[in-house]
Image (spheres, rainbow, N blue to C red):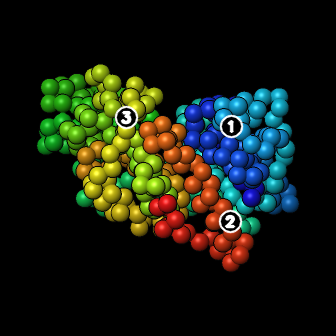
Amino acid sequence: MRIGFIVNDVMTEEASFTTVRLACEAINHGHEAFVFGVGDVAYDPDEFIRARARTVSKKSYKSHVTFLRDLQGPKADRQRITVDELDVLMLRNVPSDDYIKRPWATNAAAEFGRVAMRHGVIVVNDPNGLAKASSKMYFQLFPEEVRPRTVITRDREEIKAFAQSEGTIVLKPLQGSGGAGVFLVRPEDVPNINQMIDAVSRDGFVIAQQYLPAAQEGDTRLFLMNGRPLRVKGKYAAFGRVRSGGDMRSNIHAGGKLAPAEIDHHALAIAETVRPKLVQDGMFLVGLDIVGDRLMEINVFSPGGLGSAQKFTKVNFTKYVIEALERKSHYMKAYGRNFDNVDMCTL
């Protein structure tokens, strides 16, 4: 199988990233794995998509650290590949990371991926589905029983009225990720709410969201594959994140700490509730961020943390993701269709 991974920039990838682990696992499975950045892709006059990609000459690696060192270093094999000849293309770039400094890159991967699909390339997650999820508004399309109450507006008075009715709310930008520009607004903070709104609305719409007290204990990221919780030998691909000090954000790069996850009936019920739409939109690998009995976020763009899940479960979940892609490729070649065998997510 020839599999491509498109990232923001190959040279900014880190050994702990899920994409690096997936590419390394693909090599260890005997596949050809190519990694390239959004800016490395081109549409040629012969109507094929090509990319300046990096791969490695070794056939197996004991460590994804060594793999990345070879991929980014002088030992890398650099080729201009035809993307349309790949069996699988994984869109593993994070558009919000390019939103400010490289706005041209935010939608490029999905657009080129959509063209590659014409020639039978399996593209995951589906670029047509990702187009619907280009902002956090996508979250509002899921059943309301799993979501916090929310207002999305640029009107200051509407946000103030929502804060008064809820008592405590969270403000965050409609665009962006990683906990940037997130504010907790308590009743005593209302006198300063104008400054918070100004800071969040500088780049667009404001999300004002019901605050969930359970967030004080952190959140849980649960991975879904083909719409089902990814579970291997009774262990879920999941991990917890606990807030650090007084910071309300539990994102790891916002100071949160990793912890084991306990997947209860609330998490499984949420996963089942969102499954139909995720499958309909072609979301192959997804990360659900869950607080108590509510869903806080759905990560469809390059969801990360499979290494964190492995840390606590001792299960190499990337192996099973690659094997699921092998099945997709097999069915495409055999039947001309990209079958999604969702039952294969429980192993």
SS at mark 3 in the image: strand
For residue 329, the mark is 2
Q: What whole-number distance in Å separates the C-alpha atoms at marks 2 and 3?
A: 35 Å
Do we see residue 314 in this rendering?
yes
Q: Earlier in the sequence, mark 3 or mark 1?
A: 1
**Residue extending furthest toward the top:** 245
For residue 259, the mark is 3
Which x, y percent locates residue 316?
Answer: 55, 46
Q: Which amino acid does label 1 sit on?
A: Lys
Q: Residue 10 appears in which quarter of the rendering?
A: top right
Q: In this view, does 252 lie to the left or right of 25?
A: left
Do we see residue 205 in this rendering?
no
Q: Which of marks 2 and 3 is in front?
A: 3
Q: Is residue 265 left or right of residue 313?
A: left
Q: What whole-number distance in Å separates the C-alpha atoms at marks 2 and 1?
A: 25 Å
Instruction: Compare residues 63 and 117 and report the one nearer the observer.
Output: 63
Mark 1 is surrounded, within 10 Å at the Cα level, by few (under 14), some (14 to 19) or many (20 or more) other residues, namely few
Q: Nearer the viewer, mark 3 or mark 1?
A: 1
Q: Nearer the viewer, mark 2 or mark 1?
A: 1
Which residue corresponds to mark 1? Answer: 62
Which x, y percent locates residue 202?
Answer: 41, 32
Q: Residue 339 appears in which quarter of the rendering?
A: bottom right
Which x, y percent locates residue 302?
Answer: 55, 46
Mark 3 is surrounded, within 10 Å at the Cα level, by few (under 14), some (14 to 19) or many (20 or more) other residues, namely some
Q: Earlier in the sequence, mark 2 or mark 1?
A: 1
Q: Which amino acid does label 2 sit on?
A: Ser
